[in-house]
Amino acid sequence: MSPGHAGSGNSPPESRLISLLSRLVPRDERTEWVEEWCAELEHIRAPSAPGGWTQRWRRYLGAAEDAVHLRIRGITPPAGIHDVRFALRSLSKNPGYTIVALLTLTLGIGANTAIFTVVNAYILRPLPLPEADRVLVLLGMTGDRIGGVSAPDYLDWKEQSTSFSSMGAMHRFGVTLTGGEAPLRIRQARVTPAFFDVAGVAPLYGRTFTSEEATLGNDRVAVVGFELWRTAFGADPEIVGASVMLDGEPHTLVGVMPASFRFPPMSDQIWRPLAFTEVALNRRGMHNLWVFGRLANGVSTAEAASEMNVIASNLEEAFPETNNGQSVRVRALHEFALDGSGRGVFMLFGAAGFVLLIACANVANLTLTRGAAREQEIAIRTALGASRSRIVGQLLVESLVLSVAGGALGIAAAYLSLGLIESNVPQSLARVGPLTLDAGVLLFAAAVASVTGLGSGLFPSLRVTGSSAHSVAFSGVATSLWGRGTARRARSAMVVAEFAMAVVLLVGAGLFLRSIERLYSADLGLDTSDAMAFGLVFPQADYPVPANVTEGVNSVLQQLESEPTIQAVAGISQLPLTGRGLTSALLIEGGPAEMNADSPSGNLRMVSPGYFELLGIALTEGRALTNDDTENAPLVVMINQAAASRYWGAEDPVGKWMSFTEIDGQPMHRRVIGVTEDVRQSGPAGSVFPEVYLPHRQTGEVWLWNGAAMSFVVKPAPGGVVGIEALRRAVGAVDPNLPINSLRTLESMVGFTVAGARFNSTLLVGFSVLALLLAVVGIYGVMSFSVRQRTREIGVHVAIGANRSDIVRRVVFDGVRLAAMGTALGVLGALGLSRLVRSMLFEVSAADPVTYVGVVLVLATATVGACFMPARRASRIDPVEALRAE
Amino acid sequence: MSKIRMTYATAMVLQALDGGYMYGFDIADVTGLRGGTVYPILRRLEGGGLVRSRWESVGVSREEGRPPRKYYRLAPVAQEIVAAARTRFPEASAVIGRLERTK
């Protein structure tokens, strides 16, 4: 047997282990290392060898340690460990410096790690779908607005396109689950079987849908999401095959999706097969589907998009009466799910970067200051033969040790802040996935920490070692280079830069705060105070015809009115502030005789007569709806001002007719009886659309368009509150199987519409406070250092009779001068950078003077405060002591 | 040669070599040090010229049916250092001495 047998075919286990470990050993030593260890290990395998199994394992461990030892020796300079030890010793000798620097680094690195967690979770991390970047959403566009896709269009897309390996359609509406303790309203999507192919996720239990189940009559099956399976079905793995009641009808559960399955922006809890009805298959103008596709192999998103554009324009040509103005927009699902929130996240990332730069400048300043105290030590070491690079390296190791510790603390700080961040995340982001500190985040924090260590350590260490050994060692502290201009200028420059960056952040935060304030105080066109809202859906099984729905709504309204805690109640089919509406094309008096692509459109809302009064929506013309506008009365509508001016311009709209329904092919005319103020239906920053309000008792078949859903708004009696029990009692008296859904206050709905802006401004304010704090610490540090350095000079001044208040003034003036330069630069920077966030602001100019003046005032106060303490110390200098100290 | 840092572990290894132990594992056994400690020390001593290593002759190993082992010996110049180590860490030589006697 040759010595070098380690790699041979039937090698014993230890030689395989050794050859594995040998990869760690530097190449030139590898062969010999392998031979030695193999021989040793085989020796103890011999029957004669002493020791048992544990001893043998200790030997293997020894080989591993030895290999690691050789590897480490190969990469780190021999003195590396020594430098770290030295750094730790020298840092612990100077706890003041260490603590302030650590705290600064923790804040800087922590802020960046926290915001990177957000970037990572929502923007960088792919959706939890296999090859998620190949999953696209195919949006049906009506002009510039996202509409839906009709069933015939979807089927033509699917048939004519070749870019997709699968294409599925979805129609979403809620469903009521009964059979548990209380009826439950859940989010449901009806999907074609191909939807699960697009998602590419297999069920945890059971199966998804067969194509046969997507036909009428065979579609009484459902796949349940993990969360609902856990909460409503007790996570029972045997649930597959069981029957559940959905909207009052039995359905067989055929599958359970895994916990990781998410398909943002959708957040459905249960899926049922989508079987197209005869009506749907014949209505190319009924745009109610979402369509998703998974790219076929080798096809790019751009190629798929251009193919879809051709298909859509062919359909436009073939069916001009329905498809005129209809197009398709192809977008990656991930990008679509973010819904524009990505820009805000990147802005915050930039802001956190500024905080880090300020932190770096601060630590560098501290290090420079500390270097002054160490210059003799360094000079002596130089004189004893240490090279400059050796000393620079040593000082850098100190910075790195600090930043590694700061990084660890920063990660901890970021981890602690995750809960706070997550509770503020707007829903558009939260749907994408959970916030977690994963390997990517840790890697990022480690990279930030090391860059910070280099950034804050390199410049000071080059400076400190830049002077010749002689001049320092033999000159004494008083006349050292630290009194010279360049070093002081360097420190001053850093303070100026810190202030400039702090100003940019403070201005950003100020603009967002002002914008939030405007959002909350904006005139929505309605009074949300005290009002609460909830929804009901009247299932078709129990309410088969529209008249039943009207009856149900009436009964619920009456029951609610009879509750003593409720002062007023009203119904509306689509709540304000949700952005939802039933958009319909309209025939109007004086308009085109037939509906076409150019027909005016409006959002239809069914309301009970008390709605406008309850929410304080003012009537501007005509009369309001009353209880006399019943099924048997003439058909009427109310419209908002936007509708009045859109449809009839300056003409008086009252008395004019419009139509959106037909009876026997004849349009049903409804007369406008009144005009209301505009309501911002998607929140303060949303736009105003034409609205058409019809009395709920004249709704008829429009209930079917709406899925027989009605929301109720209640206002409590003065000084009282409305409990959910009261609502349950009232609704239960009408129908015990009707679940109350989405109970909330209207105030919270306003909050919801501004959640994105609030998230951005909360974090931005946090960052800017950090920045201000760090900048103030920075200027304080520099001023007190400069006072200490000038003790003798000040002493002389005092000795020859300078006034103490003069000295205070001079020191403060020095500080204020630096701060003023920084602020001026910062204001310029902010004017430039705030343009980038202009589109995220609401009714606030990016150059808003109030914000800028406010920021300058805050900074001025903070600066004077920070300089005052060192100044007072300076004024108390005893000239005798100061001179004797030399 | 003066670059060798005289630690307790190094003293133990020197004493073991002086006591006639030649193989890495034997030294680990007699000193109670781990292999991961003994080998780097041996290499350092070899680098400093205090220790020489040889491969055992193939004949010996073939007889025992195993690959040849590497063995270590103190260089003549090392005697001075070993003596110095003994004075500096008397407890180290005591441990080795005792083990020698019990063997």
Image: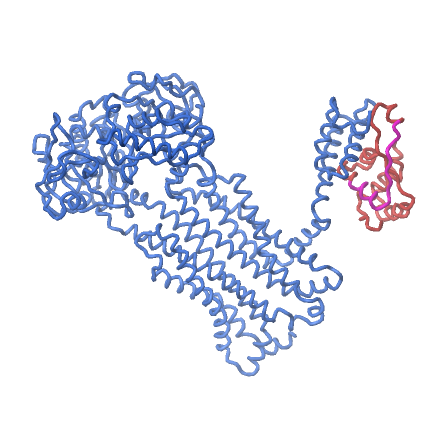
Front residue (pair A681, A834): A834
The residue most toward the right is: B76
State the count of labels.
0
Which image quadrant for residue A328? top left
Which image quadrant for residue A725? top left
Query: Where in the figure is residue A605, as x and y percent of width and height?
Result: 20, 37
Q: Quadrant of the N terminus of chain A?
A: top right
Give left or right: position of A810 versus A755: right
Give left or right: position of A7 versus A124: right
Name the residue at 51% across, 61% down: A777
Front residue (pair A407, A179): A407
Query: Where in the figure is residue A718, as x and y percent of width and height?
Result: 20, 45
Front residue (pair A515, A710): A515
Residue A496 belongs to magenta span? no
Query: Where in the figure is residue A474, as x and y percent of width and height?
Result: 71, 71
Which chain is red in the rendering? B
- Is residue A299 placed above or below A368 in the rendered structure? above
Which chain is blue in the rendering? A
| Res A550 seen here | yes
Q: What stretch is highlighted in magenta?
A: B40-58
